Amino acid sequence: MQQVLDSRFPKAVTWGREFITIYNDAFRPILGDKPEALGRPFSEIWAEVWDQIGPIAQSAMEGQSTFVENFPLVIDRRGMPEQAYFTFCYSPLRLRDGNVAGMLDTVIETTETVEAQAKLEIVNQELAHRIKNSLAVVQSIASQTLRQHVDPVVFVDFERRLGALANVHGALAMQDWSGGQMEPLVRSALGVTLDMSRVHIAGDDINIGPKTTMSLALLLHELATNALKYGAMSVDSGQVDVTWKVDNSLLQFIWREKHGPPVTAPSHKGFGSRLIRHGFSTAGECEIVFSREGLRLKASAPLDAIPN
């Protein structure tokens, strides 16, 4: 008991089936302006939320520990109801014979953190919306300015790349710029351009960061566009295999086209070629093979260069 009272972390002990409460000084701010709670039943102290926390406390008295994170509760501790959030653990306290005699409540209030995260999410959504609009404006200005002065094929490629950039930006914004799993990204990036019934996708379960997500999405866009124009997907029989695996702390990514027309290396290396050869990480390597069977690309990068 002395350890609980001396702790600087908010803690309370309830004793017996009546949940008679003892708490330390660090627990006092949790109570707010509630009447003196020392020696009173926990169910009376938190009467307004006992229907929510009572079953959890009862589980502790039955010998089961429970950890709850950012638990929402509407409590009355300053003369009016207020929304608050708590991360807490209810643990059984046992006598020497093993019987449960009470409960230890270790708690921290997370209201400010939860509310700040909610506000940040709103700001991120607004920022994502504005950036998306800005990309649309850039695309419109470029269309009006360059359409009459640039090779139409080059201009269409530019528009598609800008569109791919906008799409992946939107996807990242929906995930709070945390990146995501590789397989959904691959399917999403290729599904815009290719007939997915002719695309085989398989790989290890791996998360990649936002920077790698952006690079990989642009790489996939270029590969898919080229496959549709010149490679396997330009004929009805063509197929594409997209696979990846983690081997010795190295992420290996393979794009393999098959059953398409023979392909040869382009005589002119434009922006698209440079983008493909860059792979998905500046710290990695990229190997491209043009053959009668179709294009084959193998890109690799150390896992520590791909934040996840």
Image (cartoon, rainbow, N blue to C red):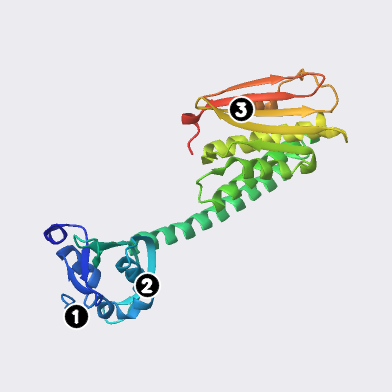
User: Is residue 120 left or right of 287 when viewed as pictured?
Assistant: left
Tag on residue 35? 1
Which SS class for mark 3?
A: loop
Q: Can you identify the residue that label 3 sits on? A: 279
Q: Earlier in the sequence, mark 2 or mark 1?
A: 1
Image position of 94 with respect to 274: above or below = below
Who's the residue at 55% across and 51% down the image? 173
Tag on residue 21? none
Query: In the rendered image, which quarter is residue 34 located in?
Result: bottom left
Nearer to us: label 3 or label 1: 1
Q: Is residue 150 visible?
A: no
Q: What percent of the width, then of the height, locates residue 87? A: 33, 61
Q: 20 or 124, which is in the foreground?
A: 20
- Measure the alpha-carbon separation of dots 2 and 3: 54 Å
User: Is residue 31 left or right of 204 when viewed as pictured?
Assistant: left
User: Is residue 64 left or right of 32 when viewed as pictured?
Assistant: right
Tag on residue 55? 2
Tell me the amino acid under the disc marked 3: Gly
Which SS class for mark 1?
A: loop
Which SS class for mark 2?
A: helix
Dot 1, how many residues are within 10 Å of its Cα: few (below 14), some (14-19), or many (20+)?
few
Q: Earlier in the sequence, mark 2 or mark 3?
A: 2
Query: In the rendered image, which quarter is residue 181 located in?
Result: top right
Q: Is residue 248 visible?
A: yes
